[in-house]
Amino acid sequence: MRLATPIKAEVERLAIAYSQRLSEVRRYLHRRPERSGCEYATTEFLAEIVSDLGLSPTLADDDRGLFVDINHHEDSASRIAIRGDIDALPIQTELTADYASRATGPMHACGHDAHAAMAWGALAILNDLARDPECGDAVPAARVIFQPEEET
């Protein structure tokens, strides 16, 4: 699907506007990795920042992982899905940056902190576009999924 020029420009504007927050989300998650099966605090954090966007996340049955729907109506025939995994690997970090893992044992060596941050960024942009009277009708129904336990 090709985006119309006004929508494309708005997506680019929003991506720039969210870039700092996106980096903060990734670094927050990178500092606090949780192994597969233990992603409770990660899920809680993601639910909070999704709620901050004015959206209502749906938690998985065991409170690990969540999903959020954008622009979905009962008469929506289809929707796109965006998935970001949220678990970490059982590897000790050697990174010394301020955003290095603070946990003993797990780290986001697999990039799931970035996956989750990018899924949140896509969600934030889609949410803004869906609420924009000039763009809203062009935004597809979407489900953004934050998946736990991908490594197992």
Image (spheres, rainbow, N blue to C red):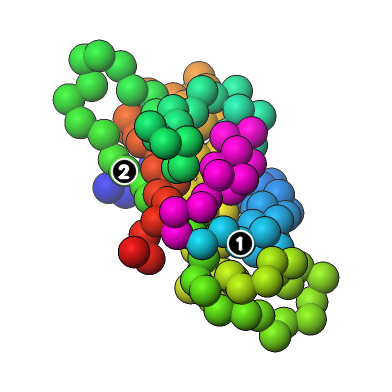
In which quadrant of the rendered view does residue 3 lie? top left
In which quadrant of the rendered view does residue 75 lie? top left
Is residue 36 visible in this depiction of the protein? yes
The percent coordinates of residue 134 (x first, y second) are 49, 24
Dominant secondary structure of the magenta stretch? helix
Q: In the image, 43: left or right of 103?
A: left
Residue receiving disc 1 = 33
Classify 10 Å Cα crowding around label 2: few (below 14), some (14-19), many (20 and above): some
Q: Earlier in the sequence, mark 2 or mark 1?
A: 1
Q: Nearer the viewer, residue 140 or 51?
A: 51
Q: What's drawn in magenta, residue-wise?
A: 36-48
Classify 10 Å Cα crowding around label 1: few (below 14), some (14-19), many (20 and above): many
Q: Nearer the viewer, residue 67 or 77?
A: 67
Q: Residue 46, relative to residue 97: is it above or below?
A: above
Residue at image point 34% right, 64% down: 152
Considering every residue shown, the one lying at the far left of the view is 77
Q: Any mark on residue 120, and which?
A: none
Residue receiving disc 2 = 81
Amino acid type, callout 2: Ala
